[in-house]
């Protein structure tokens, strides 16, 4: 029986979904999806007299149970969680009874899962586009369902659209539906949580990049994207070596339009990625290593509810850095971990070290929107806990076989932190005996899992690859008290990789805000404003806005209105809002471009700059 999910109304302790089928008609003109969902359910106990589903801003027309029209009611909306749809069964059913529930409905203009783009917002400018993002609790706004990661389902879909449709499933064929429409058929045979249902439709073309991988995007970008992501198969093969055979058949990538709010989303068979990764230098493909790692961590072994989200993300970051280690060595893993630590420090600072949002396993029972707690904390505090365990139990030789056992033990399940920990102890005792269990017991798990603020242990990562970046940052920090800048030259950063530039800038943002003449000099010598790598561009703009350096403001406005990745736009909006003469500019920019952003991003930015509570 699934554990209670504070972010869902579904009565999953009574009855659970096993399969979900979507019959959808897409209308770009009306900006809606209309059709029905068919749920296969099975009762877990006797005397079940209703089915409660999650919905959000849906227009529900009729409900059928085993083909007979059924009574239903829709509860008043909960601000974050949406409206419970209660379907009354004509007769109570006994344990193990199977039911087919069909709901006729359509989405509305308030749908938070789907963003519709006008042709002008796409690369080709000729066709509209739509894409979904369901994590954490938005699947309920495009289909009534038991919207909890505690329930794992297979799914299928028949989607009729004037433009090509892709989903997080295998494409099994398509038929001409007349009037210039095509019906696309999909099937996902591996069980997965509802938040991984995903769709995109638009002028999409594919280019093969590996034996099981195709890159999809608008034709204007497909060659650049195929080149950027050429290493995809290497990452998958490394994941398989480390863990278990890849289960999902295909691993395709979809490069989204610029308003996609995340770096990537691990939708099965079809990872969604931001176009900000396509830099022409393969410098940001670690996001692909991350999304591939989700094929095991998150998609196969899934969090039971959003309080244990770190089991998805902490484990995925840990696996992603293992892939880095296999391909580029331990020093690269350490370097990447240093960058993660910095992101963690910033998140803790943003929420405040005493904020409940800094807890690895936060309490969501008050009905808070899980999106409000989204940050680096589950990713990096989670990573650091696993890294600390790895060091404590004897390093990779002991830990890597355990990772595999974790996947084998929990594949196709949804688990809690407590279940994870019990298996960890069980595994170590069985394979390494009391000595290693005693080592594990030296770890203060309660403090790691339930404590606020930074992790209780400083990881002391190896700084070999960071030292040059730190040394250069130190020279600039010291130059603030000197008139002589002749010691700096373009050659200082000539041999730096994009990541080293990033770490150099990150170090500078830890210093006091810089005097403007130093920022001007740095830009003149290192051409910082012109760098296209999005992470480096972001850090440079952050450094300048922290110092209220006004020449950067127009570049910031350009960057936050040409892409909508929350990792970049949210901190820049917040900083601009606080910077000298920046508050008006931040608000004006947002109001003018609100329609550009994905609904999830827009709602959070509004909170960031005080336009909404
Ligand atoms: C989709 O639209 C067509 C044409 O209007 C209609 O016949 C069909 O029933 C619709 N499908 C669904 C699932 O609503
Ligand atoms: C999660 C869950 O099971 N919720 C509810 C489903 O309905 C029963 C009976 O009304 C409740 O007791 C559950 O709490
Ligand atoms: Zn992730």
Image: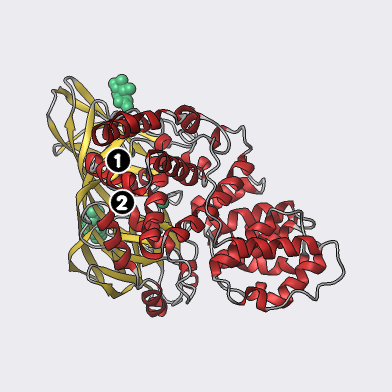
**Which residue shows up at 35% across the image and 37% down it?**
54
Percent across and percent down for residue 334 are: 49, 55
The vertical placement of 210 against 140, above or below, is: below
**Secondary structure found at label 1:** loop
Quadrant that contains the C terminus: top right
**Which residue shows up at 43% across the image and 49% down it?**
111
Q: Are marks 2 and 1 in contact (CB under 8 Å)?
A: no
Q: Residue furthest front?
A: 435
Q: Nearer the viewer, mark 2 or mark 1?
A: 2
Residue behind mark 2: 197
**Which residue shows up at 40% across the image and 74% down it?**
225
Q: CA distance from mark 2 to mark 1?
A: 11 Å
The vertical placement of 610 against 180, above or below, is: above
Nearer to me, 300 or 203:
300
Residue behind mark 1: 145
Q: Name which quarter of the figure residue 438 lies in.
A: top left
Colouring chosen for the image of the structure: secondary structure
The vertical placement of 223 against 562, above or below, is: below
Residue 287 horizontal side relative to residue 186, left or right: right
Percent across and percent down for residue 298 are: 33, 46
Quadrant that contains the N terminus: top left
**Beta carbon of the mark 2 residue lies under 8 A of ligand 1:** no
């Amino acid at each position: 029986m699934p554990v209670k999910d504070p972010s869902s109304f579904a009565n999953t302790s009574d009855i659970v979904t096993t399969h979900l089928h979507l019959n959808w008609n897409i209308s770009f003109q009306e900006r809606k999806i209309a059709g029905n969902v068919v749920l296969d359910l099975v009762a877990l106990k006797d005397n079940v007299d209703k089915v409660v589903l999650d919905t959000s801003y849906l227009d529900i027309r009729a409900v059928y149970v085993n083909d007979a029209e059924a009574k239903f009611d829709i509860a008043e909306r909960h601000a974050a969680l949406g409206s419970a749809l209660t379907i009354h069964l004509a007769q109570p059913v006994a344990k193990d009874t199977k039911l087919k529930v069909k709901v006729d409905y359509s989405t509305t203009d308030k749908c938070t899962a789907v963003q519709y783009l006008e042709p002008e917002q796409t690369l080709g400018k000729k066709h509209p586009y739509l894409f979904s993002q369901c994590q954490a609790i938005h699947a309920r706004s495009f289909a009534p369902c038991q919207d909890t990661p505690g329930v794992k389902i297979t799914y299928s879909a028949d989607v009729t659209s004037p433009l090509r449709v892709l989903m997080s499933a295998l494409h099994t064929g398509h038929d001409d539906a007349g009037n210039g429409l095509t019906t696309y058929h999909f099937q996902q045979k591996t069980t997965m949580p509802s938040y991984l249902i995903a769709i995109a439709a638009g002028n999409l073309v594919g280019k093969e990049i590996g034996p099981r991988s195709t890159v999809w995007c608008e034709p204007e970008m497909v060659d650049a994207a195929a080149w950027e992501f050429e290493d995809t198969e290497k990452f998958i093969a490394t994941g398989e070596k480390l863990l278990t055979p890849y289960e999902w058949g295909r691993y395709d990538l979809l490069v989204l339009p610029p308003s996609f709010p995340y770096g990537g989303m691990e939708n099965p068979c079809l990872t969604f990625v931001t176009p900000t990764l396509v830099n022409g230098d393969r410098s940001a493909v670690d996001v692909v290593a991350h999304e591939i790692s989700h094929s095991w961590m998150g998609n196969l072994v899934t969090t039971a509810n959003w309080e244990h989200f770190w089991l998805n993300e902490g484990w995925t970051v840990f696996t992603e850095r293992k892939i880095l280690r296999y391909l580029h060595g331990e020093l690269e893993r350490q370097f990447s971990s240093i960058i993660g630590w910095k992101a963690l420090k910033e998140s803790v600072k943003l929420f405040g070290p005493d904020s409940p949002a800094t807890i690895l396993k936060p309490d969501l029972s008050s009905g808070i929107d899980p999106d409000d707690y989204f940050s680096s904390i589950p990713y990096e505090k989670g990573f650091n806990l696993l890294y600390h365990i790895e060091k404590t139990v004897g390093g990779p030789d002991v830990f890597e076989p355990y990772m595999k056992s974790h996947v084998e033990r929990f594949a196709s399940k949804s688990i809690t932190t407590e279940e994870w920990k019990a298996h960890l102890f069980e595994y170590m005792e069985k394979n390494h005996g009391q000595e290693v269990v005693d080592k594990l017991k030296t770890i203060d798990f309660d403090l790691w899992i339930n404590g606020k603020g930074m992790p209780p242990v400083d990881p002391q990562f190896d700084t070999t690859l960071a030292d040059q970046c730190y040394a250069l940052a130190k020279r600039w920090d010291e130059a603030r008290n000197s008139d002589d800048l002749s010691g700096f030259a373009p050659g200082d950063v000539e041999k730096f990789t994009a990541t080293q530039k990033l770490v150099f800038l990150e170090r500078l943002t830890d210093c006091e805000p810089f005097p403007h003449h130093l920022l001007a000099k740095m830009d003149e010598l290192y051409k910082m404003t012109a760098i296209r790598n999005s992470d480096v561009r972001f850090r440079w703009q952050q450094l300048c806005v922290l110092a209220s350096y006004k020449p950067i403001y127009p570049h910031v406005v350009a960057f936050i209105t040409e892409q909508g990745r929350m990792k970049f736009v949210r901190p820049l909006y917040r900083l601009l809002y606080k910077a000298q003469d920046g508050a008006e500019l931040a608000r004006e920019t947002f109001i003018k471009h609100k329609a550009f952003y994905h609904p999830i991003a827009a709602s959070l930015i509004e909170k960031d700059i005080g336009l909404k509570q």
